[in-house]
Amino acid sequence: MNEYFKVSEAENFVFYKVPKALFTDNRYKDVSTDAKMLYGLLLDRMHLSVKNAWVDKYGRVYQFFTVKQAEELLHFGHEKICKLFRELEQSNLILRKRQGQGKPNIIYLKKFSQF
């Protein structure tokens, strides 16, 4: 078995996209790489929100992405994931709205600056 990718296999994989601006824009220089990866996961899930018609009365797309789901995908503990969500909020990349006891937060993904 060949361990290298061939041309015919090059597009067989799905990838998470993390915006380059999060690494090149000075406004995001203090955002950890782990938080940037979490943002990439949230960005990837936006299509599910649109598919589920999770849009508020202002036309803003929102999503539900629990700490538990983030733990499972990123393989970090509860405290670390909570810290990453806070980091994204403090960097103005997301807005979380609490719904109450036992319900997941509503997460609005904010646009990152490209300029």
Image (tube, grey):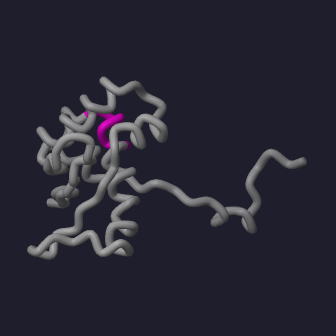
Q: Nearer the viewer, residue 54 or 21?
A: 54
Q: Position of residue 35 (x, y in %)?
A: 30, 38
Q: Quadrant of residue 101?
A: top left
Q: What's the residue at 34%, 64% (across, down)?
A: 46
Q: Quadrant of residue 30?
A: top left
Q: Position of residue 36 (x, y in %)?
A: 31, 42
User: Most extreme residue toward the front, as rendered?
Assistant: 101
Q: What's the residue at 27%, 31% (across, down)?
A: 82
Quadrant location of the C terminus?
bottom left
Q: Total of numbered circles in the picture?
A: 0
The rendered magenta stretch, by its main secondary structure, is classed as helix
Magenta span contains residue 35:
yes
Residue bounds of the magenta highlight: 32-37
Q: What's the residue at 42%, 43% (across, down)?
A: 69
Q: Can the viewer see residue 96 in this picture?
A: no
Q: Nearer the viewer, residue 37 or 28?
A: 37
Q: Is residue 20 left or right of residue 15?
A: left
Q: Position of residue 15 (x, y in %)?
A: 52, 56
Q: Can the viewer see residue 114 in this picture?
A: yes
70 in relation to 4, above or below: above
Magenta span contains residue 27:
no
85 in relation to 49, above or below: above
Q: Quadrant of residue 9?
A: bottom right
Q: Is residue 97 left or right of residue 63?
A: left
Q: Nearer the viewer, residue 7 or 92?
A: 92
Q: What's the residue at 35%, 27% (across, down)?
A: 78
